[in-house]
Amino acid sequence: HEPLSNHTNFRVGGPADYFVEVKTEEELVEAINEAKKLSAPYFVLGGGTNILVGDKGYRGMVIKNKMDQIKIAGFRSSLQKASDVGVKDVFVRSDSGVLLNRLVRYTLEQELSGLGNFLGQPGTVGGAMYINAHNMNQNDFFGDHVGEAVILGPDGALETVPQQYFKFGYDESILQKNGKTVVSVVVKLTKGTKDAVWEKANAAQNHRHTTQPKG
């Protein structure tokens, strides 16, 4: 009987019959399996920034995604560090529960170019995958930067799929139709310079602030 008003930006929403927070892939699988044992539908909730919950709440289990790990997954070269001269493509792995803005800032701090247009956007990486987050001023879509992702089906099976699997479009992805959940994502970025990547990101954020309603 957890009030979902505690977990959405609009601060409204009735209770979920069951509510659990998960911080690892294993906990996510366990929660979904528990929902199956209870014969209860489940809903995976991210940042709660793009959802409205009715006063009657949710008849089932709400799984709050708190998975929050980010790491460098690899390089398109034989070198070992992103700071090494000669590295061009850098792959970053992010859990789906990571706030999108946190992932963007992480990549900027690593002097990586690719996600700067999403600086300041709300929600989680999982939400960005589900809706194919975008910056239309720059005609930039989050899905364009995805290399591959690990997804989890209602049957509890994990699989790694390529970018093409998601059939990204404007405000859409296959996730809206197949009921599967993103566990983690690998994004493909390029090595840049500190000044250049932050200049582009700050310009995108400033444009958003001047063209969209506050709050």
Image (spheres, rainbow, N blue to C red):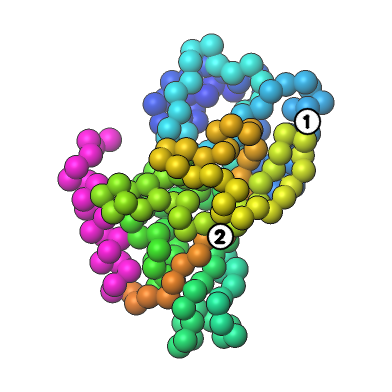
Q: Secondary structure at mark 1?
A: helix
- The type of residue carrying mark 1 is Glu
Badge 1 local density, few (<14 within 10 Å), some, or many (20+)?
some
Residue positioned 45% across, 63% down in the render: 106
Q: Which residue is mark 1?
A: 34
Estimate the x, y position of residue 17 in percent, counting from the top left. Answer: 65, 19
Would you say residue 109 is visible in this rendering?
Answer: no
For this view, does 71 lie left or right of residue 106?
A: right
Dominant SS in magenta: helix
Q: Secondary structure at mark 2?
A: strand
Would you say residue 75 is visible in this rendering?
Answer: yes
Estimate the x, y position of residue 15 in percent, counting from the top left. Answer: 57, 18
Among all residues in the image, which is located at the extreme bottom?
A: 85
Q: Which residues are magenta?
A: 195-215
Toward which corner of the image does residue 11 lie, by quadrant? Answer: top left
Q: Is residue 205 magenta?
A: yes
Task: Pick the quarter of the image with the C terminus.
Answer: top left
Estimate the x, y position of residue 90 in percent, counting from the top left. Answer: 51, 72
Badge 2 local density, few (<14 within 10 Å), some, or many (20+)?
some
For this view, does 70 lie left or right of residue 143?
A: right
Task: Measure the C-alpha gap from mark 1 to mark 2.
Answer: 31 Å
- The type of residue carrying mark 2 is Gly
Total labels drawn: 2
Q: Which residue is mark 2?
A: 147
103 in relation to 67, above or below: below
Residue positioned 33% across, 56% down in the render: 117
Residue positioned 69% across, 43% down in the render: 152
Assess whether mark 2 and mark 1 are in contact (beta carbons under 8 angstroms).
no
Toward which corner of the image does residue 79 lie, by quadrant? Answer: bottom right
